């Protein structure tokens, strides 16, 4: 399924394959400027992988909502700074594709809350994908930094007086029966604030 806001074409496919939920998405940039996808979600050690993606289990819709974007801070959580993914640039006229593999039953994955480890397996009826992005603005500068050993990230910096226009690409709901782990007991918090790497807290300082 695809959606085409503005000059971006967003194609998404979801299927079950060998006990995994496989989501394939692509972005075709037909516009005149580069686009930066907020798709490189970090784990606790600041490593990134295509398979790292935030997942909401929307029980009322029986929907697996997966997204690569700046995650909202849940009520009752007060981090020093919000978490944001690293970016992938898609140049004008370029095409980008990524494949995400999620083990089933699918578990919720939140930037700030621990994931469940037990619960009841329920079949959901659909999958939806969202990817955040922003476009190049005049004067924007790119550079590459090393976040931790073995992990490099593209960062962008704005000139004074400029602001980014954050948007999102959202697929239609893809009908698919997917086993999901609902509720249950949570593991120990995956990111205790006292032990997080300093690079983990970044208030959009790369932008």
Image (tube, rainbow, N blue to C red):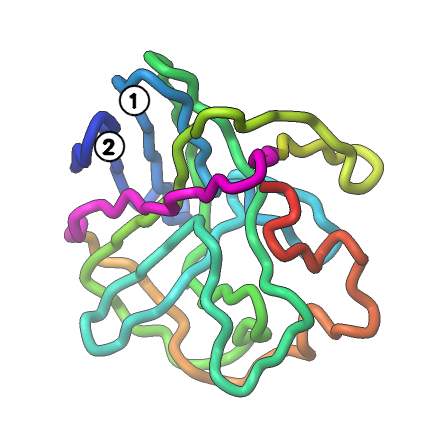
Label for residue 104?
Answer: none
The magenta-colored residue range is 156-175
Q: Residue at x 22, y 45 (%)?
A: 171
Q: Where is residue 36 shown, x and y percent of the image?
A: 45, 32
Q: Residue at x 44, y 51 (%)?
A: 69
Q: Where is residue 168 shown, x and y percent of the image?
A: 32, 46
| Foreground pick, 122 / 58 | 58
| Foreground pick, 160 / 68 | 160
Q: Residue 164 appears in which quarter of the rendering?
A: top left
Q: Residue at x 18, y 36 (%)?
A: 5
Residue 99 position (above or below residue 178): above
Indicate whether residue 80 is drawn in magenta: no
Q: Are marks 1 and 2 in contact (CB under 8 Å)?
A: yes
Residue 125 position (above or below residue 185): above
The residue most toward the front is: 161
Q: Where is residue 181 shown, x and y percent of the image?
A: 41, 72
Which quarter of the rendered picture does the C terminus lie within? top right
Tell which tag, 1 or 2, sits nearer the viewer: 1
Dot 1 lies on which element?
strand
Q: Residue 59 appears in which quarter of the rendering?
A: bottom left
One can see residue 2 in this view: no
Circle 1 residues within 10 Å: few <14, some 14–19, many ≥20 = many
Position of 69 with respect to 26 (left or right) is: right
Tag 2 or tag 1, which sits nearer the N-term? Answer: 2
Q: Which residue bears the numbered disc 1?
A: 28
Prevailing SS of the magenta stretch = loop
Label for residue 11?
Answer: 2
Q: Residue at x 33, y 34 (%)?
A: 25
The residue most toward the top is: 93
Q: Where is residue 130 shown, x and y percent of the image?
A: 32, 49
């Amino acid at each position: 399924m695809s959606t085409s806001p503005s000059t971006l074409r967003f194609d998404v496919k979801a299927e079950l394959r060998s006990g995994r939920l496989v989501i394939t998405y692509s972005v075709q940039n037909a516009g005149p400027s580069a686009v930066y996808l907020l798709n490189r979600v970090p784990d606790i050690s600041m490593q990134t992988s295509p398979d790292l993606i935030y997942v909401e289990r929307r029980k009322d819709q029986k929907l697996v909502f997966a997204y690569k974007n700046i995650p909202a801070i849940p009520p009752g959580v007060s981090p020093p700074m919000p978490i944001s993914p690293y970016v992938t640039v898609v140049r004008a006229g370029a095409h980008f594709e990524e494949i995400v593999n999620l083990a089933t039953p699918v578990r919720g994955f939140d930037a700030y809350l621990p994931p469940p480890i037990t619960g009841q397996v329920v079949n959901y009826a659909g999958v939806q994908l969202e990817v955040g992005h922003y476009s190049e603005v005049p004067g924007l500068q790119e550079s590459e930094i090393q976040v931790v050993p073995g992990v490099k990230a593209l960062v962008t910096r704005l000139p004074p007086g400029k602001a980014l226009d954050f948007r999102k690409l959202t697929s239609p709901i893809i009908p698919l029966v997917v086993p999901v782990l609902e509720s249950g007991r949570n593991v120990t918090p995956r990111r205790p604030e006292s032990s997080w790497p300093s690079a983990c807290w970044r208030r959009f300082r790369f932008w």
